Image (spheres, rainbow, N blue to C red):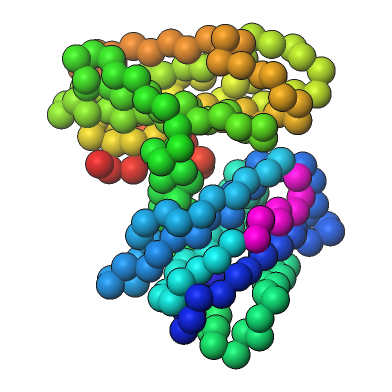
Amino acid sequence: MKIQIEKRQEFVIDVKLRKEQCGLYLQFLNIHKATAENECGELVYNFNTYACQITSDSFFLDPGTYFINFLDVVSLHHPLVTVDWVIRSPSPLTTVSMDFVIIPFKTAIQSVQEVVLKYGKSEKYENGNLIVYTYTNANCFLIMADNLYKWTHIRYNATLLSDKEGVYSGSMLKQTSWVPISPRTRSFVAFLNHIELGVSTSQIKLEYCLSSWFMKWLNWIDASIFSENFELAISI
């Protein structure tokens, strides 16, 4: 959604999946300032939950133009998702204009990557050529990696060690799957949806390896497989 505001105003936003699609999913509601090129710029607010509906906290927006992005991680794998939006404010919306816009898949992924960059923690490996970011809260745990090598592919694996009741993990943590990270790209390599507090990083085994040159065709094929998924690689 694109929203234009003429004066400072308070909002609460609800986004809910239609009943036939409703389930417990990891959901993000991100609010970005719009750039002069009509693209998502600075991340202003982030809300996320593990549910079939997301409701923001009360927040204020100053005059300007913003993009409000809703992303449901699981529904990325479905061709069509229908949602209902509710915009509430204690003030009249007479100075607010709203338009529904379709954002590219890449932009939706970048929006969530911005959450991890802004609020997550980072560690450097391989003399700074591999940067691993982790982001966790009561609803989710995300792992993202930057491959800063010019030519070398990196393969990354994250395995969930805990069988704790009440924990649901995304496919990247349910099986041994070495995600390819192409040179000069940023990619999510694992995500975990958890209902309960207390799922720590110590319950996740992290591994990576540098991919040999003779595996370049396999790297290219595997990278193309993830091109329409949450693990989509973004050039950096």
Residue, x 34% and y 11% (percent of image)? 209
Residue, x 22% and y 22% (percent of image)? 129
132 horizontally vs 17: left or right: left
9 horizontally vs 56: left or right: left
Residue, x 68% and y 44% (percent of image)? 49
Q: Is residue 230 above or below residue 43?
A: above
Tell me where residue 179 sits by quadrant.
top left
The residue stretch that appears in magenta: 51-58
Image quarter hosting the N terminus: bottom right
Residue, x 50% and y 75% (percent of image)? 8
| Magenta segment includes 56 | yes
Name the residue nearer the viewer: 53 or 175.
53
- Give the x, y percent position of residue 235: 27, 43
Q: Is residue 165 visible?
A: yes
54 horizontally vs 210: left or right: right
Tell me where residue 198 sits by quadrant.
top right
- Give the x, y percent position of residue 66: 45, 69
| Magenta segment includes 191 | no
- Give the x, y percent position of residue 76: 59, 48
Q: Is residue 175 visible?
A: no
Name the residue nearer the viewer: 177 or 137.
137
